[in-house]
Image: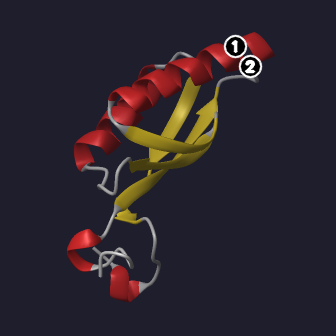
Amino acid sequence: MKKLRLCEFRELGFELSATLHRELDEAEQDAFVDALIDMIEARGLCWGGGITGGYVCRLARRSATEDDRAAVAAWFRASPEVSEITAGPLHDCWHAGPQYAI
């Protein structure tokens, strides 16, 4: 079960999608991504994606939590570059399908 990441070894994450007020220039993109990485790493999370969306999970075979989901969404909402944010529900990082539902 551990190698398959099933049952008590399941890992949870969530998808995130953002809409920007306007297209950012290269320097603005760099600053935004640096700030995003600082926040993600401070929480012990991983980010896979780009400026306008991605997937968030936790490092070291652990699950992201509802608190993590709320904190990442709040960071995006507080960013002046972002006009809209959608944070999906927690779900299994490795498996899809109704048999793996939370």
Callout 2 environment at 10 Å: few (<14), some (14 to 19), or many (20+)?
A: few
Label 2: state its secondary structure: loop
Residue occupying the point 38% across, 86% down = 98
Q: Which mark is residue 24?
A: 2
Residue 74 screen position, x and y as percent: 36, 30
Q: Amino acid at mark 2?
A: Leu
Residue 25 shows in this picture? no
Residue at the left extreme, as displayed? 8
Q: Nearer the viewer, residue 67 or 85?
A: 67
In the rendered view of the protein, which quadrant contains the C terminus? bottom left
Q: Could you tell me if the residues under marks 1 and 2 are in contact, i.e. CB atoms within 8 Å?
A: yes
Residue 63 screen position, x and y as percent: 30, 55
Residue occupying the point 47% across, 29% down = 76
Residue at the front extreme, as displayed? 3
In the rendered view of the protein, which quadrant contains the N terminus? bottom left
Q: Which residue is mark 1?
A: 28
Label 1: state its secondary structure: helix
Residue 60 shows in this picture? yes
In the rendered image, the vertical position of residue 6 relative to residue 29, given as above or below: below
In the rendered image, the vertical position of residue 49 relative to residue 92, given as above or below: above
Residue 43 screen position, x and y as percent: 32, 32
For this view, does 52 lie left or right of residue 86?
A: right
